[in-house]
């Protein structure tokens, strides 16, 4: 059995819209908020709304999409609703200034927050169902390869937002949002025209997979909770949590670390992270193939060890010359980890519950996005310096590795040899 590259690329358009929109949002919305509020703390809180919304709504809509049956499919109704409405609010964001001045009162912040909240909510409506498209359409042994393509497409969306969006923002501040919203609608049209959800999706069907419709930590109808039914589920979710704690603190505080440790300008510090982002995108597809070849757990352990080593090197080496190179190597490790992590969680989903387990995956990543800046901020305050950023990250990745080693290899992976025995059509 071979991976259908064309179908996977079409499915990846949904994730492309997510990366494009969020990168643009995270890059430019703080500028608008800073102008109106003048408080970095308040701006920082508002910028965590996407994580809070994701933590609350994505498991709900992922679970709800599992039970949805329409002529458009299970996931597409949420994508068809979420993308256009998210795109609408997204494109309205930069017009808060003009709209807010149309009234006798200054309502700029009211309009901006309304657009921000609207975008955050409708992005939460379709994200988990969109990501669940892949395991619905791709058999389990090929999901690491498929997720490599999807991750690379997400990286393309990020690069477009940075490169093209940055250039457009210098011309007119609303151009990147109009571009992003337009690409989101075009991606939706391509999905509607060229992709049809399978009537019976691929799903976990082995007899040892947990059955029923229980919650993550609580049972239902006399059955055990999901974590009680599968001993590897909580460890893999905690692995993801600590990984993203380590990564989110890096993205949020690296500029402060580099300016303090190396005495360089903030713009130069930001550029030092570019090699990591580029290598991550380039290596996403090979990471999927590596996961298929040597196994998801082995690939993730290897990537995790690479992150711990590279973070330790940056902590110890004082010369900034080597930092971009070491960061690029860490991008390889991060690709090996994240490209195989979601397929590993999806592998544990009982039949008909891929959306629910997708929601669990994002619930732990968003929880990390909320907790990590707070935990690191407290650490930095106690130590009185940002010089320990990579020590904090190393500790988080070490905790992730500990929990990863608790995950049973058989619970998250099919061998490459099993691909030839996998059915050619979706199964009950």
Image (spheres, grey):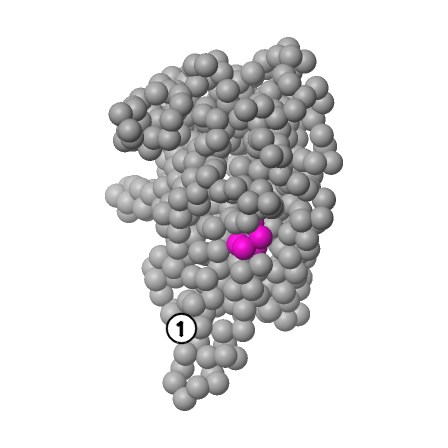
Can you give x and y, in whole percent of width and height, for residue 328 in the image?
A: 59, 34
In front of the other: 332 or 313 = 332
Q: Residues within 10 Å of mark 1 (few under 14, many from 20)?
A: few
Quarter of the image containing the N terminus?
top right
Could you tell me what secondary structure mostly forms the magenta stretch?
helix
Q: Secondary structure at mark 1?
A: helix
Residue at figure coordinates x 64%, y 57% from the top left: 185
Q: Nearer the viewer, residue 19 or 304?
A: 19
User: On the picture, is 55 further left or further right than 126?
Assistant: left
| 196 relative to 305 in the view: left or right | right
Left or right: residue 284 versus residue 309 is right
Instruction: Choose between 223 and 3: the one closer to the eye.
Output: 223
Where residue 183 appears, x then y in whole percent? 66, 56
The answer to whether any part of residue 59 appears in the image is yes
Q: Quick check: can you spot residue 322?
A: no
Residue 180 sits in which quadrant?
A: bottom right
Q: Is residue 80 magenta?
A: yes
The residue indicated by pointer 1 is: 110
Which quadrant holds the C terminus? Answer: top right
Region rendered in magenta:
79-83
Total numbered labels placed on residues in the image: 1
**Residue in the image at 45% along x and 25% along y:** 350
Q: Residue at x 55, y 45 (%)?
A: 70
Q: Quadrant of residue 120?
A: bottom left
- Residue 226 location (% of width, % of height): 35, 26
Please tell me which residue lies in front, 410 or 322.
410
Q: Residue at x 49, y 59 (%)?
A: 119
Q: Position of residue 409 (x, y in %)?
A: 47, 14
């Amino acid at each position: 059995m071979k991976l259908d590259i064309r179908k996977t690329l079409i499915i990846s358009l949904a994730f492309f819209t997510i990366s494009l929109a969020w990168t643009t949002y995270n890059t430019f919305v703080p500028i608008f908020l800073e102008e109106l509020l003048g408080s970095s703390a308040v701006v920082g809180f508002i910028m965590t709304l996407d994580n809070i919304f994701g933590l609350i709504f994505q498991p709900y809509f992922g679970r709800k999409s599992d039970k949805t049956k329409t002529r458009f499919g299970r996931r597409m109704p949420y994508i068809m609703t979420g993308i256009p409405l998210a795109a609408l609010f997204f494109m309205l964001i930069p017009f808060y200034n003009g709209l807010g001045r149309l009234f006798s009162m200054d309502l700029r912040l009211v309009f901006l927050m309304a657009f921000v909240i609207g975008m955050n909510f409708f992005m939460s409506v379709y994200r988990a169902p969109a990501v669940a498209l892949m395991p619905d359409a791709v058999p389990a042994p090929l999901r690491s390869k498929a997720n490599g393509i999807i991750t690379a497409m997400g990286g393309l969306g990020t690069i477009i937002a940075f490169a093209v969006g940055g250039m457009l923002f210098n011309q007119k501040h609303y151009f990147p949002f109009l571009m992003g919203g337009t690409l989101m609608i075009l991606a939706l049209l391509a999905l509607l025209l060229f992709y049809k959800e399978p009537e019976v999706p691929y799903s976990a069907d082995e007899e040892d997979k947990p059955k029923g419709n229980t919650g993550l930590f609580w049972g239902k109808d006399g059955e055990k909770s999901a974590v009680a039914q599968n001993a590897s589920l909580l460890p893999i979710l905690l692995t993801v949590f600590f990984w993203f704690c380590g990564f989110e603190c890096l993205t949020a505080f690296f500029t402060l670390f580099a300016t303090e440790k190396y005495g360089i300008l903030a713009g130069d510090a930001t550029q030092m992270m570019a090699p990591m982002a580029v290598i991550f995108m380039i290596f996403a597809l090979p990471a999927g193939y590596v996961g298929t070849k040597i196994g998801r757990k082995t690939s993730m352990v290897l990537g995790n060890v690479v992150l711990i080593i590279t973070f330790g090197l940056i902590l110890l080496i004082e010369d900034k010359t080597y930092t971009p190179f070491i960061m690029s190597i860490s991008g390889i490790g991060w690709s090996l980890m994240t490209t195989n992590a979601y397929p590993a969680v999806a592998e544990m989903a009982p039949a008909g519950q891929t959306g629910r387990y997708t929601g669990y995956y994002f619930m732990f990543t968003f929880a990390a996005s909320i907790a990590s800046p707070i935990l690191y901020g407290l650490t930095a305050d106690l130590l009185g310096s940002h010089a320990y950023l990579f020590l904090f990250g190393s500790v988080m990745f070490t905790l992730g590795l500990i929990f990863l080693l608790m995950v049973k290899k058989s619970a998250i992976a099919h061998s490459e040899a099993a691909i030839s025995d996998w059915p050619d059509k979706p199964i009950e």
